[in-house]
Amino acid sequence: MSSTALHVVGVGNAIVDVLAEADDAFLAAHSIPKGGMMLIDEAQARDIYGHMAPGVEVSGGSAANSVACIASLGGRAGFVGKVARDNLGDIFRHDLRALGVAFDTLPLDKGPGTARCLINVTPDAQRSMTTYLGSAGYVSPDDIDAAQIEAAAITFFEGYLFEQPVAREAFVKACRLAKAAGRMAALTLSDASCVDRQHEALVKFSGAHVDVLLANQREAETLFETDNLEEIIRRARALCPLTAVTMSEKGSILIPRDGDVVRVAAAVPTKLVDTTGAGDAYAAGLLYGLSLKLSLAKCGALGALAAAEVISHFGARPQASLKKLAVDAGILSGAGQP
């Protein structure tokens, strides 16, 4: 990799997160599925936001959170996502660029405003998300910069955005560019309900284009249509060259098409506060490790370390230097290289 190349480019929803504490009664009152993600319209967004407890607003979005973590690990990252030409869009762009992430997607001039995700966190650290997609779903093939994709070791796609037909065309274009340049494509499944809705299309896309597939246990069970772990492993090998399945406190497993399954222990957080972004952080560590050509065991350990940092506080982006934590843990050298 040249000094000007990128380790990972993320393609996903550009969203501003609003996080607040809540109880189960609040979720029930607003018909919010606990621990999941529900799409809402602008009127619902105003209603839920108006009843939420005081909280914090931070730039978010699954793939954007991942590239923010990659920057914290010392990596070079880029992002493709759509914001509106409004205040929230300006905040999102500034936050990402301030981390050193290359983000040059042109904003949407007409149409819906910048997306926002209302995240209510219950005392058990479960995050329940209601998302108004706004401009985020307007990513199109025109937003894919061939030079950027060709410069990245891995292009990483967010499953939430896969549901938008025009964005899916952008995914295919980017995958073809990556493949032609000898680069890798990665996909995170994002949410089990998303997998259920798009099952056939996701299986077809993954088999045709994806080198690295990431899922939590529920998402993997939904995609592979079984809760038998050995059968998941068998079907994962047949679908993609590498599949990573996270299992919360049980750690994760990395399933290569050829070779032994690698089991990775979960890293223990200093305290469990908010699970928002745990999967995004794990993906960041895994993909950054792969871009450096680390062993699968080290890639998984880097993902576990990043996830443990993120769930120890409110918000989906790291508050401590992930690079320092990884160096201290002996996963990376002081230069951030293997």
Image (cartoon, rainbow, N blue to C red):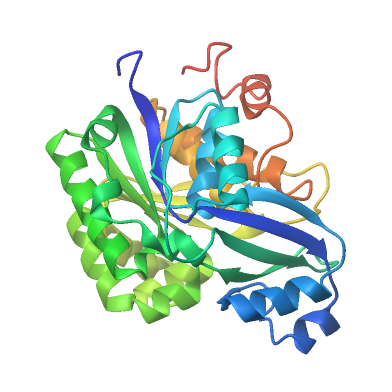
Which of the two residues, 115 or 331, is positioned nearer the viewer here?
115
Q: Residue at x 58, y 11 (%)?
A: 334
Q: Residue at x 17, y 58 (%)?
A: 208
Number of callouts in the render? 0
As drawn, the residue found furthest toward the front would be 110
Image coordinates of residue 272 in percent, x first then y, are 80, 52
Image coordinates of residue 48 in percent, x first then y, are 74, 76
Image coordinates of residue 193 in percent, x first then y, are 48, 78
137 shown above or below 243 = below
Q: Residue at x 48, y 52 (%)?
A: 83
Q: Residue at x 69, y 48 (%)?
A: 58
Picture quadrant where residue 37 is located: bottom right
247 shown above or below 64 = below
As drawn, is 109 to the left or to the right of 52? left
As drawn, the residue found furthest toward the left would be 180
Q: Which quarter of the figure is the N terminus placed in?
A: top left
Image coordinates of residue 300 in percent, x first then y, are 51, 41
Picture quadrant where residue 288 is located: top left
As drawn, is 200 to the left or to the right of 252? left
* Residue 301 seen in the current view: no
As drawn, is 325 to the left or to the right of 193? right
* Residue 32 seen in the current view: yes
